[in-house]
Amino acid sequence: MKATKHIIMAITAIGLAACTSQTGGNTQETTDFEYANERFADLQMLRYKVEGFENLTLNQKLLIYHLSEAAMYGRDILYDQNGRYNLTIRQMLENIYTNEGVDHTSDDFKAMEVYLKRVWFSNGIHHHYGSEKFVPEFSEEWLRQQIEATDALAESPYSTDEICQVIFDPTVMPKRVNLAEGVDLLKTSASNYYDGVTQKEAEDFYLAQKEKGDKEHLVMYGMNSRLVKMPDGSIVEKRWTTSGLYAPALQKIVEHIKLARPYAEDEQQQKVIDKLIEYYETGDLETFDQYSILWVENTEPLVDFVNGFIECYGDPLGLKCSWESIVNFKDLEATKRTECLSKNAQWFEDNSPVDARFKKENVKGISAKVITAAILGGDLYPSTAIGINLPNSDWVRKEHGSKSVTIGNLTDAYNKAAGNGMKQEFCLSEQEVELINKYGDTTDDLHTDLHECLGHGSGKLLPGVDGDSLKAYGSTIEEARADLFGLYYVADPKLVELGLTPNLEAYKAQYYSYMMNGLMTQLVRIQPGNNIEEAHMRNRSLIAHWCYEQGKADKVVEMVKREGKTYVKINDYEALRNLFGQLLAEIQRIKSTGDYKAAQALVETYGVKVDPELHQEILKRYKALDLAPYKGFINPRYTLVTDKEGNPTDVTIDYTEGYAEQMLRYSSEYHTLPLANN
Ligand code: ZN
């Protein structure tokens, strides 16, 4: 019962995003915007810019405003879903944190502050990614004193002893989600989706439901409820509805979705909203599927949103969905870019260096959709996905398709916040750093667009060739094909002509960062002693090493050593482009003819192996940079502006709120649930 991965997480371990499979956002330079904010534990807080918000119509702004309010009101739900003590612990810690009588300078206080910031980040006391319980670095004795002195547990349904045990005893609730086989996964997971039932009982319960259900249109049983064993031994679902469990939060959400409704962009979007309200009120799963169909087919409006119980990673059985919300609007600039490429798809196909036999006579480009996030809530906040592919229902996806989007402004924020650390350490000289700072974002986005919109769709198989004939090497070869298509064309004068690159120099930024990544920096994501496994990484290594070796005699690309450190040096960018073109032609030949042997030789020779000495050097240099492995976002703050009669005249956006400030405000303004929810 493993969940399929429907979200794309950013690769945040590497500060320099050279060619990931994400479409970037608006690349206009925003100079004085502060992307990187505070850092603590293994976390780095970022801000994202809602580019284009000011240019929206008043109705669109009001739609976003009310949907954002609805997104905030679900915050408590996730805390309770993640563990039944979380709301109490959050309130207790905030009580101590904001109490003026407490000594804010002691080491215990400072350690508690970090702990609280981690609780906010994870929406609970377990790590958002690894799901292990945090180890507090303040003493239990100190905490007990503060609880006593500030009456921090005044409203708590639990005793001080119980709370201290949950925080300090490593054997109590050690993991939020336990996936290790051999034990009862429900008993060993701290998440709050089951109460008193064994794994076997839960599995049987849902199996019986499935067997009775409509096989062709199977609803997602169990997705919106807690499964509870009653005192009489019966097992019942407590559904999350406006009259059931989590009612106070869901009522608030519905209230604000209703306020958004008059500003919906078309009739279909109003139907989406009506269906969502009906679902929140009834908890009926068929209604949820109907809502999903309306939502997936509503593609016209600029503004769109997700608000509901969506992803099931928090449930070891993969049934129960955590609450999340995102409000967004289409990035018209980025979408224009992909449309421009799509329109010219045939020109790119006709002019590629590939053998004419392998070209498509009629090629159609894909317009990848890029969106701008306006607010993040629930399980998308502060840690978030950079791409979304929904709905999750298998039958709805099969019959009605899905919406697949990349969130441009979040990717952009990751890139901008990465700063110069990686570049300063690994680029050959200031000249390359400058080149990448100047053109890196633009050409990176373009490379991704070329890869996604044209690369994967280009070329054809010869008649009779089986698409799976490259077997295990298939996905590496396919990614290499799309990447090479992008690399070859990002340097083409045609892009300047189309207004997509500013000049004939810009592509060099992409070439340099691609080669540096493929030859060196992507190794930071590989454990010492391991080879490269992941298809995208193998492809980058393959391309970089093949070009390096083939151009060696002419010194097209060199690896130079300076004070014990290795650097990539590109001597001849034009020759490098020719090499990319040659390899593209060869890779397309391999794909079109299904030449397994050649695919194997290329991948095994250039894509898999790691030079252990270089690897060690890279890891050491990376470690010294001391970058935070996980990142999350502070939301912007929206304010409704009204005239004397109380009619809305504008919505303003502000980016100055601090992390703790925002969390404390959310806890007071959007606190909806009691501390214990049964
Ligand atoms: Zn791809």
Image (cartoon, rainbow, N blue to C red):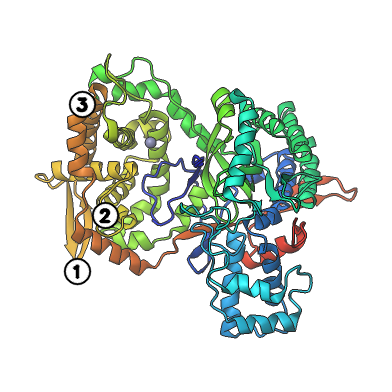
How crowded is the residue under tag 3: few (<14 C-alpha within 10 Å), some, or many (20+)? some
Kindly identify the amino acid type of the residue bearing the numbered disc 3.
Answer: Asp
Looking at marks 3 and 1 on the same chain, the residue that comes earlier in the sequence is marked by: 1
The answer to whether any part of residue 253 appears in the image is yes
In the image, what residue occupies the spot 60% across and 71% down? 167
Q: Position of residue 544 (x, y in %)?
A: 24, 45
Q: CA distance from mark 2 to mark 3?
A: 28 Å
Residue located at (75% from left, 55% from top)? 678
> Which mark, by number, is residue 530?
2
How packed mark 2 is, by other alpha carbons closer than 10 Å (few <14, some 14-19, many 20 or more), is few
Which of labels 2 and 1 is toward the front? 2
Q: Which residue is mark 3?
A: 595
Which residue is the site of mark 1?
A: 563
Q: Is residue 62 above or below residue 42?
A: above
Q: Secondary structure at mark 1?
A: loop
Badge 1 density bin: few <14, some 14–19, many ≥20, Cα 10 Å: few
Query: Left or right: 234 with respect to 319?
Result: right
Q: Decide if ligand 1 comes within 8 Å of the CB at mark 1.
A: no
Residue 80, given in percent of the width and then of the height, sits at 68, 57
Q: CA distance from mark 2 to mark 1?
A: 26 Å
Instruction: Name the mark nearer the viewer: 3 or 1.
Output: 3
Q: Residue furthest left?
A: 553
Q: Quadrant of residue 341?
A: top left
